[in-house]
Image (tube, rainbow, N blue to C red):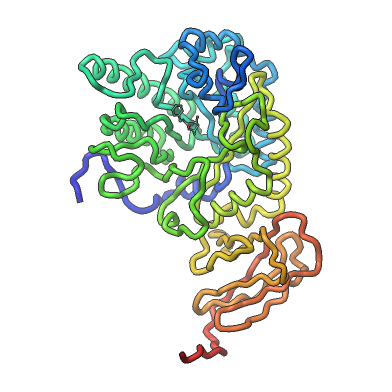
Amino acid sequence: KKQLKYGAQYKGKREDAAMQKWRSNRFGQFIHWGLYAIPGGEWKGKTYPYAAEFLKSSAHISNATWDSLSYKFNPVKFDPKAWAKMAKNMGVKYMTITTKHHEGFSLWPSKYSEFNVANTPYKKDIIGALVKAYNSEGIDVNFYYSVLDWHHPDWRYDIQSKEDSIAFSRYLNFAQNQLRELAENYPTVKGFWFDGTWDKSIKKNGWWTLKIEKMLKEIRPGVVVNSRLRADDFGSRHFDSNGDMMGDYESGYERRLPSPTDTQVIHRDWEACMTIPENQWGYHKKWDISYTKTPFELIEMLAQTTSLGGNFLLNFGPQADGMIRTEEQQIAETIGNWMKINHPAIYNGGYAKGWQRQDWGYFTQNEKDKKLYAIVFNIPISGILKIQTPEGVSIGKASLLENTNSKITIKEIAKRQINLYLPKQSFPAPFVIVLDTANENKNNYIDAKT
Ligand SMILES: C[C@@H]1N[C@@H](C(=O)NCc2ccccc2)[C@H](O)[C@@H]1O
């Protein structure tokens, strides 16, 4: 074990109320909004297939040209209450908003940079309006903040000279001031989601990343900080040089999930963030420039994430005029209809210890009602759902969550082997079975002697 000054500050999961709330939320809405929504992946008549929020780099646009987009930022149709209502109906319990993305444009009237929403035709504080509207719907708000900043003259990708280190220490002070401002001016903020921390300049300044985490927790006790912020004494990120996770939850699952049987993730808190298109976080004019995930695919990702004790953060990229595009509205509505019935399997849901994952879907254990849920995506041809019960546990009753009068026949077919027989009906959507389990040690079966 190495002696580290800037490594993990604690081991195991935080069990304080703020972290338990973060964990119980399970389903969140990511929002990527900034100047990049104006060109929407197109520049000088050319469509760029890369992520719309990278257009500045993909189309090799100068800072001056890109920054002048701020004079066009005027989302006249922006209605934070409507966004919050859509999110509430979709069933998210938290939202994470880009306060400043790699482009360096701040969506709040920052004292530390002129490059912000106050100096646009729109003028008003977007972050403040979103925090107010989402909190009014009972949705927690977290702030995404990109340390990588293409606009700021003192940003450096690496430190290779005295001049670099002088400039970069100015940049680190600037970023610290902005983060303090965010934590102080928006007291209901519940978490900070750091991005843009992969460059050598940050790896060489691990001390700063710990200082930031400590500052935010000092200003906002209970606030939750992702592992992506942190670099240790040797530049190790997310996990320190001793292999211990830094920050409060692991945030390395971006546009990917752990495999459903990768149970090493259950030992820590973690979150997967996901785009609906293959790789677009900001608004791209061409929705179908890549594959876009269907609602049922997204619901399965939410179920798979919950079954492994993680949070699922689904991304939306609002238009420059402030509207959420219709494709995203429709997906939000379909997911919301599903969540209205099936949320007990998700909220407060987590890993069901001892219940082997089956091909037909996922188990989640609700830590509040202590019930076991089976979320079914693939009905076997046989119509029989096979379950392997943990040692000493039997299933007393099983019924459809959406119709608890529907009896599901249970048959114990061998030691710790159960068959569930589904009612004869169509299942047009993923569905949930509630399982009442009981501790029981009767043992009617003999293993073969071989
Ligand atoms: C959460 C996502 N992380 C950002 C991302 O992939 N940045 C990688 C990147 C690397 C190099 C140049 C531009 C962008 C995306 O823009 C999203 O914000």
- Of residues 183 and 146, the one nearer the viewer is 146
Residue 275 can be seen in this image:
yes
| Residue at the spot 43% in from the left edge and 32% down from the top edge | 195
Farthest residue to the right: give it.
425
| Residue at the spot 65% in from the left edge and 44% down from the top edge | 91
Residue 316 image offset from top left, x and y in percent: 61, 33
In the depicted structure, whether residue 54 falls above or below residue 441: above
- Of residues 261 and 107, the one nearer the viewer is 261
- Of residues 327 and 194, the one nearer the viewer is 327
Figure quadrant of residue 177: top left
Farthest residue to the left: give it.
3
Farthest residue to the front: give it.
46
In the depicted structure, whether residue 146 falls above or below residue 259: above
| Residue at the spot 73% in from the left edge and 31% down from the top edge | 326
| Residue at the spot 26% in from the left edge and 22% down from the top edge | 159
Residue 336 image offset from top left, x and y in percent: 70, 44
- Of residues 183 and 207, the one nearer the viewer is 207
Figure quadrant of residue 425: bottom right
Residue 144 image offset from top left, x and y in percent: 48, 31
Give the mark count: 0
In the depicted structure, whether residue 345 falls above or below residue 29: below
Residue 301 image offset from top left, x and y in percent: 59, 49
Left or right for 212, reference 306? left
Residue 108 can be seen in this image:
no
